Image (spheres, rainbow, N blue to C red):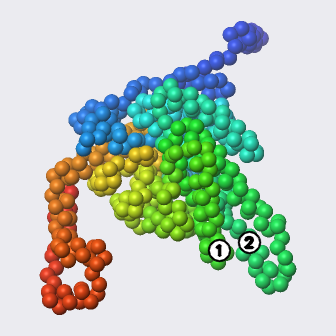
Amino acid sequence: MKAWGIFLLLLCLQAITYAVIGESQTCPAENVGKCDDSDWEGEFFPGINKIKYEGPSSKNPLSFKWYNAEEEILGKKMKDWFRFSVAFWHTFRGTGADPFGAPTKYWPWEDGTNSLKMAKRRMRANFEFINKLGVDWWCFHDRDIAPDGETLEEANANLDEVVALAKELQMQSKKKVLWGTAQLFMHPRYMHGAATRYAIRPVHDFLILIGFMSHKINWFYSSELGVYAYAAAQVKKALEVTHYLEGENYVFWGGREGYQSLLNTDMERELNHLARFFEAAVAYKKKIGFNGTLLIEPKPQEPTKHQYDWDAATTANFLRKYGLIGEFKLNIECNHATLSGHSCHHELETARINGLLGNIDANTGDPQVGWDTDQFLVDIQEATMIMLSVIRNGGIAPGGFNFDAKLRRESTDVEDLFIAHIIGMDTMARGLRNAATLIEDGTLAELVRKRYQSFDTEIGAQIEAGKADFDFLEKKAKEWGEPKVASAKQELAEMILQSAL
Ligand code: XUL
Ligand code: CO
């Protein structure tokens, strides 16, 4: 009886304490776990200071060994060569879940909901992160930063609330959006694509063809037209908020603009729809005075079996066919490049020589895994090749290097978010330093020049100017006899490259 009495007394005391003091209104950073309804008032990354350049001999994982923002390389500050950006969707919405397994990451500030309150808290975490990391840019999809709604109006209102906070945080920290985009692939309404398809139309046409139906039924069209219109409305809003957040670019990645089977697909019609969609986006961009670059991000497949913007060359052809070439550039993603059977360097060079190199989604795949693993790029040789293209392009501003990369599922510490970005930035910085060494040394350029030197002669120049017809060339072939063919010197080129690594 006595024990029960003490227990009841303790319960009463607890009740009185809550009534007088109230529940704790803060959720301090040390409180790893759930953060009920209260606002987060601690630091999100306690114990992590602003990341500094400490040089190659540093053993501190939370320091840059090669990226020195203010250092000039080939007449430009490192930070201006790169314009590094954090991808909100991976860094703040990545959970570690994969098709076989549950989430593995439980960041202390997350409360397990997709509420507006949580969206705002995450946005604050984003700004603390980019401030501490020392990057000036961030990228987002509309639906990563704010919850979707039951209606378009509700979704837009949610977005407006989070964007207002982002704008305030941007002003305080002098950060900006590198690019924004609309997420047109997650919601089931986009399962057939967003800007391409009347999936049901071929069935409908077939029924008319065999005489089963005699006239067009609007219902068959309405749902798919509804998707196209919804996607347009979503892009319209995403363009507006990107503009409001002083975004310098806007990206189109059409994950579901493609097909699973050509049997039920009218490819020509779908591509026409896509071009009309892009035309409307160009018109709207001009209407609202958004001067950012519109970028298309090629990817061959995943989630669709075949995506229409397969690679840089396919996308360039699409833009030329529809007269859109002057309105768009490309956002080359390295992991997408390898999925399409190319190297990142190939895709960058294809974009560059077509005047289309706009931005880089800096990541990499795994040579033993066949899908888009979105890893941080840590291969110094690849980074060097990438930077050779970027330097030849004179930089990529107003584009930049967006880390469309995520932690491995098994990396679960908060500090891993920093370490991953640091090694991504250091790797690219090593690439820049190496590429600059190669360019200043000039041996590689000389090797390449020599391979084409016969075209530097008078007749070579005539050929390059399109002034040598077949009759003339036949005459020369007879006059010169069997040509001597020189070595390509590939191994020597590889040796020169390695000397700079
Ligand atoms: C998907 C991908 C996207 C785009 C933006 O593979 O790269 O994250 O960058 O939608
Ligand atoms: Co990407």
Cα separation, mark 2 vs mark 1, equals 9 Å
Q: Which residue is mark 1?
A: 266
Is 99 left or right of 400, judged from the image as shown?
right
- 137 and 98: which is toward the camera: 137
Q: Secondary structure at mark 2?
A: helix
For label 2, count other residues whose C-alpha is less than 10 Å away and answer few (under 14), some (14-19) or many (20+): some
Residue at the extreme front of the image, as rendered: 467
The image quadrant of residue 332 is: bottom left
Image location (x, y in percent) of residue 256: 60, 61
- The disc, 2 or 1, on the residue closer to the chain's N-terminal end is 2
The image quadrant of residue 89 is: top right
The image quadrant of residue 33 is: top right
For label 1, count other residues whose C-alpha is less than 10 Å away and answer few (under 14), some (14-19) or many (20+): some
> What residue is at 39 percent from the left and 26 percent from the top?
49
Image location (x, y in percent) of residue 73: 25, 42
Image location (x, y in percent) of residue 90: 51, 45
Q: Which residue is mark 2?
A: 201
- 115 and 485: which is toward the camera: 485
> What residue is at 23 percent from the left and 89 percent from the top?
474
The amino acid type found where label 2 is placed reads: Arg
Is 217 left or right of 425, judged from the image as shown?
right
